[in-house]
Image: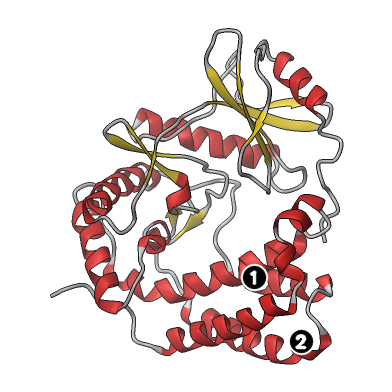
């Protein structure tokens, strides 16, 4: 498991790092909601708000982070609204005392409403624009969504964590392996493109009269439907209407092979298991123990046994179909 916990990233070190690139805060540092990295908002001497992001060591290489930055600049050039890092002296990834960090403009906005069909239509159009740019080339060093990382490596992290009580370990591991086996069987993407990678409502803001995408930290290769399925909720008929709304707008700028709809439940299973593995892998970081204390409780693992059983049933069901 990861033992790195950011304990030596003190406020003084943060301010020194920011000042090392010629930006001088005049306010305090406001921590923003991020656990994988450390992210802070502040006001600088030019009276503008900025966000500084310190990357967790050993997660991404510098080349992979730079490729994420370059992707965001491509999107901006393609008129896709995304918050891209600020360059100083033609550099966007900086280093200070062993930490890599980036500076962003602070962008506010209203929360995206996934149950609002007008919002979904706008989002479908914007994801179509994003994918239209993304399809022009492949990532060279950033990874691809894979069963090895999201399923098998995650399972190993769970086993190594020793957080599952002996009374629940057998039922949990039994259903977990069943979900892994069926997911691996059903997850066979035909085409993989560059993705936002983590396109959920927390990474979408209304700014003015349009949407803005934030946080490309999980950008990677994968099937296009990965950037769409997390907007779905409710029963099958509701999900069909939501996906139909998204794709009608999406198709104005890009095109989705409808065969990718069969990947939705495998992708959901990949995300579920990878999330558990991520928490287990980061458990030695005290910030995780403070904010996810329920992760070590029997009640959580009992809930996950039920959730995995439900997901196993969903994997056996027919794929989502579009409205006729």
Tell me, for residue 148, which label it has, or none: 1
In the image, what residue occupies the spot 83% across and 72% down?
160
**Hey, which residue is sitting farthest top in the picture?**
46
In the image, what residue occupies the spot 17% across and 73% down?
323
55 left or right of 324 in image: right
Q: Residues within 10 Å of mark 1 (few under 14, many from 20)?
A: few
Q: Position of residue 143 (x, y in %)?
A: 59, 54
**Hey, which residue is sitting farthest left in the picture?**
324
Q: Is residue 319 shown above or below 79?
A: below
Q: Position of residue 258 (x, y in %)?
A: 27, 69
Please tell me in which quadrant of the rendered image residue 130 appears: top left
Q: Position of residue 94 (x, y in %)?
A: 69, 25
Residue denoted by label 2: 169
**How many numbered discs sit on the rendered protein?**
2
> Disc 1 versus disc 2: distance between alpha carbons?
21 Å
Colour scheme of the picture: secondary structure
Q: Is residue 120 shown above or below 102?
A: below
Asked whether the residues under the numbered discs 1 and 2 touch, taking CB atoms below 8 Å apart as contact, a structural biologist would say no
Tell me, for residue 47, which label it has, or none: none
In the image, what residue occupies the spot 27% across and 65% down?
243
Q: Quadrant of the C terminus?
A: bottom left
Sequence order check, earlier mark of 1 and 2: 1
In the image, what residue occupies the spot 71% across and 67% down?
294
Considering the numbered disc 2 on the image, is that residue within a helix, a strand or a loop?
Answer: helix
Q: Nearer the viewer, residue 39 or 199?
A: 39
Q: Residues within 10 Å of mark 2 (few under 14, many from 20)?
A: some
Considering the numbered disc 1 on the image, is that residue within a helix, a strand or a loop?
Answer: helix
Q: Nearer the viewer, residue 305 or 281?
A: 305
Q: Is residue 253 visible?
A: yes
Q: Quadrant of the N terminus?
A: bottom right
87 left or right of 113 in image: right
Q: Is residue 228 shown above or below 18?
A: below
């Amino acid at each position: 498991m990861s033992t790195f916990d950011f304990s030596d990233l003190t406020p003084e070190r943060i301010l020194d790092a920011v000042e090392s690139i010629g930006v001088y805060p005049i306010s305090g540092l406001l921590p923003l909601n991020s656990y994988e990295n450390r992210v802070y908002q502040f006001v600088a001497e030019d009276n503008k708000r900025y966000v500084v992001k310190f990357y967790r060591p050993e997660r991404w290489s510098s080349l992979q982070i730079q490729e994420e930055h370059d992707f965001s600049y491509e999107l901006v050039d393609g008129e896709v609204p995304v918050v891209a890092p600020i360059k100083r002296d033609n550099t966007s990834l900086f280093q200070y005392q062993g930490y890599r960090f980036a500076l962003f403009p602070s962008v506010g906005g209203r929360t995206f409403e996934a149950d609002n069909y007008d919002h979904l239509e706008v989002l479908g159009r914007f994801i179509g624009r994003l994918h239209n740019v993304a399809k022009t080339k492949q990532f060279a060093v950033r990874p691809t969504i894979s069963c090895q990382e999201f399923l098998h490596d995650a399972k190993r992290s769970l086993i190594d964590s020793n957080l599952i009580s002996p009374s629940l370990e057998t039922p949990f591991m039994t259903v977990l392996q069943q979900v892994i086996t069926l997911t691996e069987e059903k997850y066979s993407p035909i085409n993989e493109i560059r993705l936002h990678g983590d396109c959920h409502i927390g990474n979408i803001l209304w700014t003015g009269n349009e949407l803005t995408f934030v946080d490309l930290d999980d950008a990677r290769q994968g099937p296009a439907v990965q950037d769409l399925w997390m907007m779905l909720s409710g029963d099958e008929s509701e999900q069909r209407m939501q996906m139909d709304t998204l794709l009608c707008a999406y198709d104005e700028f890009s095109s989705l092979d409808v065969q990718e709809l069969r990947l939705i439940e495998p992708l959901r299973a990949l995300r579920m298991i990878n999330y558990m593995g991520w928490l287990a892998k980061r458990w030695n970081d005290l910030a995780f123990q403070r904010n996810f204390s329920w992760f070590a409780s029997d009640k959580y693992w009992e809930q996950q046994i039920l959730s995995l059983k439900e997901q196993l049933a969903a994997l056996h069901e027919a794929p989502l179909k579009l409205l006729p």
